[in-house]
Amino acid sequence: MKDEKYKLLRQGILYDLIGMSTMAIPVVGPFLDMIWAPLAAKQMSKMYKGNEGKLASVVVFLEEILPFTDIVPTFTLMWLYTFVWKKQPAPQTIEIRVDE
């Protein structure tokens, strides 16, 4: 589980760098964002399942398609939310009695 967790972080950082790199290309960058936005959204939904992954894929799509928002590291923020900030349910102890 721990290896998978950090694999997601490495992938997220790579995808964030790809998304940010389009800002460095003056004229072509915005057009590359139109190609990258749906690809990033698809990758986000693959990486994070459920409703949170769907919401994150919409957010990353909007972040990539809107001008001047490429600086936001959406994949890394989603990883932080999933593995650092999100409260995990407390483990419950189930007591079993055996009548003898």
Image: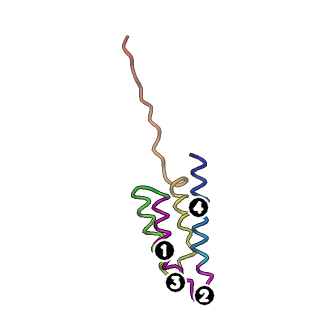
Q: Are marks 1 and 2 in contact (CB under 8 Å)?
A: no
Residue on which disc 2 sits: 26
Which quadrant, please, contains the C terminus?
top left
Residue on which disc 4 sits: 11
- Give the side of residue 54 with respect to residue 14, left or right: left
Q: Is residue 24 magenta?
A: yes
Give the residue type at disc 4.
Answer: Gln
Looking at the rendered structure, the secondary structure element under dot 3 is: helix
Where is residue 35? Give x, y as percent. 49, 77
Residue on which disc 3 sits: 31
Gap between marks 1 and 4 measured at Cα: 16 Å
Looking at the rendered structure, the secondary structure element under dot 4 is: helix
**Magenta stretch, main secondary structure class:** helix
Gap between marks 2 and 3 measured at Cα: 10 Å
The residue closer to the viewer here, 63 or 35, is 35
Upstream in the sequence, badge 1 or badge 4? 4
Q: Which residues are magenta?
A: 22-46
